[in-house]
């Protein structure tokens, strides 16, 4: 397997098919950033307001937050109803849209690599085609995801405190290891579901077998993708940090003099930063799916060829 060739070909396909980014990656990336900011912000504030972290905290962050939301409802019922509707729409889109676009992207990339010309309408059709199976798979696999496990660990720490956590911490460590192993084994499940049109359970079994048989290729590709992720994250961090350092004195000045103007400028900068961050994340999302689609196609083709050669040899001996 030629790793560099796969990554180079995937990057070329990503750059030559910008419509994949705008139609099937930009909005899901935007949603993931918005939901991620709220989710991790809540987890960080809950942990910070835990009495085990801050001795002065009362540990009632969630109840205090609910009370503030109820007070806002009573003070501004119309505005809060609008806010609830917007939040509900964002959550529904976050729940369904990434699954839909992922199925579309995998099929589109596989057909484009085969030399076929694809349209956005065909991508939407592909997204609907395997949506239910992919959605069922995502509901199943989220239970073992690293984010879910770390959320449970943080919740247990806030409830139990540091002392019991030290005693039973090895259980969480074991769960994390098992979750990582399961995540590795299901690396190709989505591609079996979308490309080979297998069921959820069958795709998990086939993916596990492929990972075990081709473990060296899979681990090497994971290592390469991890290095690429780190490099992209550093580039984005630097890109966002430089403007922040330039604009920080401006915000400080406006906050001391013209609060409203400072708030407007801050909101505009926030929108611009969110736009570029969503675009960069969308580019990497398409690139990552392309890399793994190519890897899946090459590995399954090699195995099919090996089986055909073996059967031909057995038939010749007979």
Image: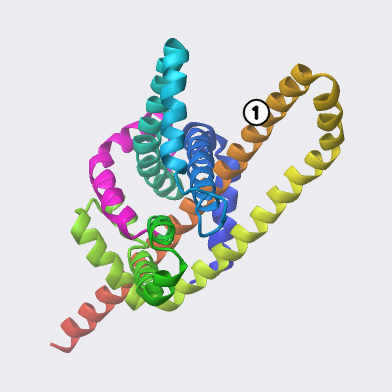
Q: Is residue 155 left or right of residue 141?
A: right
Residue 39 image point, x, y percent: 47, 43
Closer-to-camera residue (123/39): 39
Picture residue at 33% right of the left edge, 37% below the top:
127
Position of residue 258 relative to residue 199, above or below, is above
Q: Position of residue 244 (x, y in %)?
A: 78, 40
Please tell me whether residue 264 is drawn above or below residue 90 in the rendered image.
above
* Residue occupying the point 38% across, 55% down: 148
Quick one: 14 or 80, which is closer to the camera? Answer: 80
Looking at the rendered structure, the number of numbered marks drawn on it comes to: 1
Is 135 part of what is drawn in magenta? yes
Q: In the image, is 314 to the left or to the right of 165?
A: left
| Magenta segment main secondary structure | helix
Q: Identify the element where label 1 is drawn.
A: helix
Q: Mark 1 points at which residue?
A: 271
Specify the segment rendered in magenta: 116-145
Where residue 151 appears, as percent x and y from the top left, is 41, 55
Near mark 1 (Cα within 10 A), the count class, few <14, some 14-19 or many ≥20, is: few
**Residue 2 seen from this side:** no
Q: In which quarter of the image is residue 243?
A: top right
Q: Residue furthest bottom?
A: 317
Is residue 44 shown in magenta?
no
């Amino acid at each position: 397997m030629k790793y560099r060739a796969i990554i180079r070909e995937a990057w070329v396909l990503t750059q030559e098919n910008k419509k994949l980014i705008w139609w099937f990656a930009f909005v899901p990336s935007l949603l993931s950033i918005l939901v991620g900011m709220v989710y991790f912000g809540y987890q960080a504030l809950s942990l910070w307001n835990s009495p085990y972290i801050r001795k002065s905290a009362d540990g009632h962050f969630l109840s205090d937050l609910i009370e503030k939301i109820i007070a806002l409802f009573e003070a501004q019922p119309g505005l809060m109803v609008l806010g609830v509707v917007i939040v509900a729409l964002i959550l529904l889109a976050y729940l369904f849209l990434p699954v839909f676009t992922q199925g579309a992207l995998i099929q589109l990339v596989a057909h484009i690599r085969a030399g076929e010309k694809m349209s956005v309408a065909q991508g939407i059709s592909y997204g609907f085609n395997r949506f239910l199976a992919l959605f069922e798979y995502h509901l199943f696999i989220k239970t073992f995801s690293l984010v879910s496990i770390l959320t449970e660990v943080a919740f247990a720490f806030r409830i139990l405190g540091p002392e019991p956590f030290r005693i039973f911490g090895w259980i969480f460590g074991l769960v994390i290891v098992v979750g990582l192993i399961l995540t590795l084994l299901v690396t190709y499940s989505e591609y079996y579901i979308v490309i080979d049109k297998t069921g959820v359970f069958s795709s998990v079994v086939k993916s596990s077998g492929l990972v075990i048989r081709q473990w060296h290729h899979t681990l090497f590709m994971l290592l390469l993708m991890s290095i690429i992720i780190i490099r992209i994250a550093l580039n984005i961090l630097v890109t966002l940090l430089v403007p922040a350092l330039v604009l920080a004195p401006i915000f400080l000045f406006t906050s001391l003099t013209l609060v409203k103007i400072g708030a407007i400028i801050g909101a505009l900068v926030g929108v611009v930063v969110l736009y570029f961050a969503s675009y960069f994340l969308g580019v990497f999302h398409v690139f990552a799916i392309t890399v793994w689609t190519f890897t899946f196609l090459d590995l399954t083709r090699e195995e099919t060829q090996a089986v055909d050669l073996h059967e031909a040899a057995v038939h010749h001996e007979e």
